[in-house]
């Protein structure tokens, strides 16, 4: 019985929730009688006739855009129009009056404050006559569609009808989405700067020089241009003498924005400072004929020079998109390609010898290239030999995914300075000489430094031999290892875990040689580890003689017995843990 009562209670709660969601999804719930209900999207025109000047404001919808037709033809503010049309969604009757009220002066319907006429997309017309406000100022007396009995509705519609035309007009001087901009030009301070979007979606300066552009600077100026608004409308139809008076016949600043799919640019002109306010500037755009005022700080933000747009980055790269790198230095050439191995991407050396490349080393090279910045620009170099670039010490060719042409950069050191040049323009860049040295690499610098790599889950046995001692371990469980040699028993798991940790992903500090020689001491190793696995061949790791800088030589069957150098502490850790396993 109790369970049945709980079920009924849950059913009632669920039904109530459904009702709530239904009405919430349908929009605002309006209680009481409705005088007019229109879909705001169906409205195509709104005309306001009123006592004060201007006596008529007319708004019309053209396609998806709203325009003000009277008192001046200009784009309308979408937000202001939306607020107005939403009023007709559900015009609620707050109070009904006797028909005689329309003749009484206190209700103001004989000489109305305003008349609002709405037309929908089926050419149906609706008229709302607005009289005086109620004593509390919250409502207004109205006649809807010629009905005999006046009503009281919210005073919001009357407030809307009393607004200045300026409140209904679009104040944006330029209207565009910045992701569709293809070209951008500014004329200011006696110089014209032109920027274009390249094939790889990168901005570049094409006039007065050819150079990569700073994306952040362009994004910032496009945000400024697309959001620029008139603070005041000065004159609607300026004459030539007006333009001269505002210095808009020969404006100090002119912007042009080319949008994808449009033949002509969007244009903005900024004139002189307003002598009255001294905090605003005259401006004009192609969008409407009016001369307007914009804020002083915005006018100053639009006055940009070449240095603002110029990228200090010498080569704009997206490291993740790089697929091929060719590096030539000291008479040696290295060709590197990105390859897919299972779910991972890694780098491989194609020339001078097909070998796995060290992904960390390639990434480090690309990071250096990506972060390389100019200390100084030399835009019209007379002679490349002056900068050592007639015979560059380093040449890098980088191919990115989705880009037709590769990016090239040449580097040299001349005297105490480093210099660079790219195939993207004639400019020579002064850089730190250490950057040239960092990018001077040999094939051996890209050798894979992964001495050993395996998954510990695959390991079945471990054999360690050092200082005439041996230990042989066999896996019996995840953390259960049996010691077979030198004496049977259970191995210390912490010591086994430490050995696996040192060996399972052993990376060297430096590549030394293709094959071991007597000088490396790997024929008589100071420690040898043999790893047996469930699949794949056994892996044998050998640590040899001590090298310079407190390091030891190491090799592994995993990496074709190439010789590497590794910090000696790894060998010391393995010996210490091996001693624990013997006990």
Image: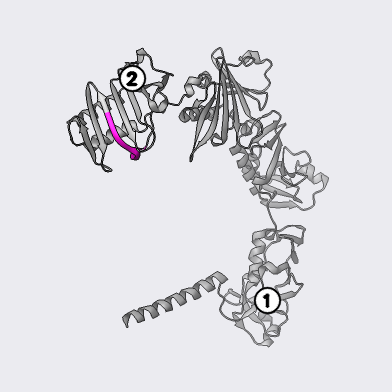
Classify 10 Å Cα crowding around label 2: few (below 14), some (14-19), many (20 and above).
Answer: some
* Whole-percent x, y for residue 131 in the image: 68, 76
Q: Residue at x 28, y 34 (%)?
A: 498
Which segment did they paint magenta?
A: 455-463
Classify 10 Å Cα crowding around label 1: few (below 14), some (14-19), many (20 and above).
Answer: many
Of the 4 image quadrants, the one containing the N terminus is bottom left
* Whole-percent x, y for residue 342 in the image: 48, 39
Quadrant of the image occupied by residue 31: bottom right
Q: Nearer the viewer, residue 140 or 368?
A: 368
Residue 279 in sight: no
Return the disc, 2 or 1, that comes first in the chain's sequence. 1
Locate residue 436 relative to residue 517 in the image: left or right: right
Q: Nearer the viewer, residue 140 or 536?
A: 536
Residue located beneath label 1 in the image: 131
Quadrant of the image occupied by residue 269: top right
> Does residue 192 show up magenta in the picture?
no
Locate residue 329 relative to residue 54 in the image: left or right: left
Q: Residue at x 22, y 21 (%)?
A: 468
Distance in Å between CA atoms under marks 2 and 1? 95 Å
**Rendered image: mark on residue 551:** 2
Q: How many marks?
A: 2
Q: Label 1's element? A: strand
Q: Say above or below: 287 vs 374.
A: below
* Whole-percent x, y for residue 154 in the image: 60, 74
Confirm or deny contact between disc 2 and disc 1 (CB under 8 A): no
Q: Label 2's element? A: strand
């Amino acid at each position: 019985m109790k369970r049945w009562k709980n079920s009924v209670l849950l059913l009632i709660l669920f039904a109530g929730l459904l009702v709530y969601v239904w009405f919430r999804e349908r929009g605002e719930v309006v209680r009481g009688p409705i005088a007019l209900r229109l879909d705001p999207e169906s409205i195509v025109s709104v005309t306001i006739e009123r006592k004060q000047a201007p006596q008529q404001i007319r708004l019309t919808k053209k396609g998806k855009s709203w325009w003000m037709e009277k008192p001046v033809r200009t784009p309308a503010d979408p937000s202001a129009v939306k607020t107005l049309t939403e009023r007709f969604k559900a015009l609620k009757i707050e109070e009904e009056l006797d028909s005689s009220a329309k003749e009484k002066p206190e209700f103001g319907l004989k000489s109305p404050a305003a008349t609002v006429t709405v037309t929908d997309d089926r050419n149906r017309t609706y008229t709302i006559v607005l009289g005086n406000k109620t004593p509390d100022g919250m409502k207004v007396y109205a006649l809807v569609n010629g009905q005999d009995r006046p009503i009281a509705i919210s005073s919001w519609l009357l407030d809307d009808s009393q607004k200045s035309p300026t409140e209904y007009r679009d104040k944006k001087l330029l209207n565009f989405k910045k992701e569709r901009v293809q070209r951008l030009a500014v004329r200011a301070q006696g110089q014209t700067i032109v920027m274009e979007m390249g094939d790889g979606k990168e901005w570049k300066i094409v006039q007065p020089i050819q150079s990569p552009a700073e994306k952040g600077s362009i994004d910032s100026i496009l945000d400024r241009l697309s959001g620029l608004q008139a603070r005041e409308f000065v004159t609607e139809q300026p004459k030539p003498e007006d333009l001269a008076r505002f210095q808009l016949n020969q404006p100090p600043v002119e912007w042009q924005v080319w949008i994808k799919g449009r033949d002509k640019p969007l244009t903005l002109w900024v004139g002189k400072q307003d002598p009255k306010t001294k905090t605003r500037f005259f401006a004009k755009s192609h969008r409407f004929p009016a001369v307007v005022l914009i804020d002083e700080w915005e006018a100053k933000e639009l006055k940009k020079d070449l240095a603002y747009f110029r990228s200090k980055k010498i080569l704009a790269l997206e490291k993740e998109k790089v697929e091929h790198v060719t590096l030539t230095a000291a008479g040696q050439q290295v060709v590197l390609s990105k390859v897919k191995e299972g779910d991972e991407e890694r780098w491989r050396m194609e020339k001078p010898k097909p070998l796995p490349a060290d992904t960390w080393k390639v990434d480090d090279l690309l990071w250096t290239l990506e972060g390389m910045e100019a200390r100084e620009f030399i835009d019209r170099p007379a002679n490349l030999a002056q900068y050592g670039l007639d015979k560059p010490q380093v040449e890098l060719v980088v191919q990115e995914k989705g880009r037709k042409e590769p990016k090239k950069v040449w580097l040299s050191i001349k005297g105490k300075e480093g210099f660079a040049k790219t195939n993207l323009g004639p400019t020579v860049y002064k850089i730190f000489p250490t950057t040239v040295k960092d990018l001077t690499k040999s094939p051996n610098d890209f050798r894979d430094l992964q001495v050993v790599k395996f998954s510990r889950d695959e390991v079945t046995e471990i054999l360690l031999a050092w200082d005439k001692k041996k230990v042989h371990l066999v896996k019996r469980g995840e953390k259960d290892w049996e010691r077979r040699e030198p004496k049977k028993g259970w191995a210390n798991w912490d010591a086994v875990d430490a050995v696996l940790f040192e060996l399972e992903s052993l990376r060297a500090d430096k590549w030394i040689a293709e094959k071991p020689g007597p000088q490396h001491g790997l024929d008589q190793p100071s420690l040898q580890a043999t790893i047996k696995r469930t699949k794949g061949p056994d892996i044998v790791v050998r640590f040899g003689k001590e090298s310079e800088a407190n390091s030891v030589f190491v090799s592994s069957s995993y990496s074709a017995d190439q010789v590497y150098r590794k910090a000696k502490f790894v060998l010391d850790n393995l010996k210490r843990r091996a001693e624990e396993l013997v006990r």
